[in-house]
Amino acid sequence: MSAGSRVFSSLEEVRLANRPLHVAVGMFDGVHRGHRLVIESAVEAARHASGLSGVLTFWPHPSRLFRPDDPTRLIFDNDARRELLSQVHVDFIIEQPFTRDFASVEADDFIQHVRRSLPSLDTLYVGENWRFGRGRRGDVSLLVKLAREVKLNVVSVDRLHFNGEPVSSTRIRGLIEAGDVESAQELLGFRYFATGVVIPGRQLGRTINVPTLNLDWQPDLRPALGVYAVRVRRSGETALLSAVANYGVRPTVDGQGAPLLEVHILGECPFGTGDRLHVDWCRRLRGEERFESLDALRAQVDRDRVAAAQYFAAAVRVRHVP
């Protein structure tokens, strides 16, 4: 996280200098290209007005409160979302707990509720379809009306479209669940990624000459099972290494339990147990399969390694086209 981004765990804990506050409000699951338009509007305005820019977001997702048996599966966990928000260069992030008390705030009282903690609030920035207040009764037109009464400004940012459809977290979730990480990247504005600590494995990969790094990664939203071409780096570093990753239940070996993310570096591997890794998902090469023998699995893994190497070689050629 950038040194300039302060994180507050609720509105009540906010302590900021008495400068005009430009605040983007929303759940911002995924911090995708559409979300960034809203947030960057606040950042730019604050910069020109010598104010402070921030994000007011919520945790957990409201569906955890209202649909606990069928909540919305989130693209990233809160740590990843916080890091993505900080990359937009906001001065502060407010992670307001979404509790029953907060959910019961009437739409007509929402602005006053926020201003009690942010007395120097200047402008709120929201997406055009943002809803707020008890029962989600408030919309942008009501927000503008309420803000005008207390001399606040509201900026409503139009939804971003890509290939004729709105960029949305729902759309991105569907792509990730289908394994289409390349299309998800187009909407996110960056590669879908996983982060986790390398944990000891059963050393089964070494028996077929394919040593793997097992990551402690249990996402809320599970990508499609299968084999992916990925890029890997140690968290906090920038150098990316090409690799093949398998996300699945390993049906040839055991086929039980939660899916596991296993990464095989194409070349010498500088990582080991205890390292925290960042894995960018580039392309799904195939779905997960069950093989009749370890020899058949080994042969397929060799083909996967070739396919991944060809993908990365082609990507390099494209980048260097004049």
Image (cartoon, rainbow, N blue to C red):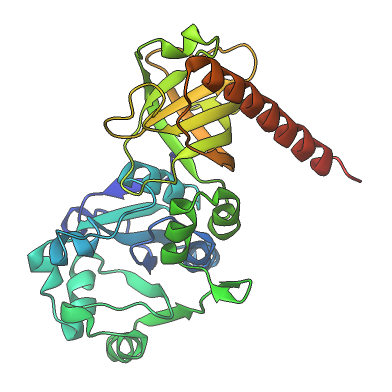
On screen, 27 above or below 124? above
Residue 124, by quadrant, is: bottom left
On screen, 115 above or below 277? below
The answer to whether residue 240 is seen in the rendering is: no
Percent across and percent down for residue 202 are: 35, 12
Q: Residue at x 78, y 38 (%)?
A: 314
Foreground residue among 60 and 291: 291
Percent across and percent down for residue 283 are: 60, 42
Percent across and percent down for residue 79 are: 34, 42
Percent across and percent down for residue 46 are: 48, 64
The answer to whether residue 206 is seen in the rendering is: yes
Q: Residue at x 81, y 43 (%)?
A: 318
Residue at far left of view: 101
Foreground residue among 121 and 291: 291
Left or right relative to 16: residue 263: right
Q: Residue at x 22, y 50 (%)?
A: 9
Left or right relative to 321: residue 36: left
Residue 55, by quadrant, is: bottom left
Q: How many marks?
A: 0
On screen, 186 above or below 204? below
Residue at far front of view: 292
Q: Residue at x 40, y 21 (%)?
A: 214
Quadrant showing the N terminus: top left
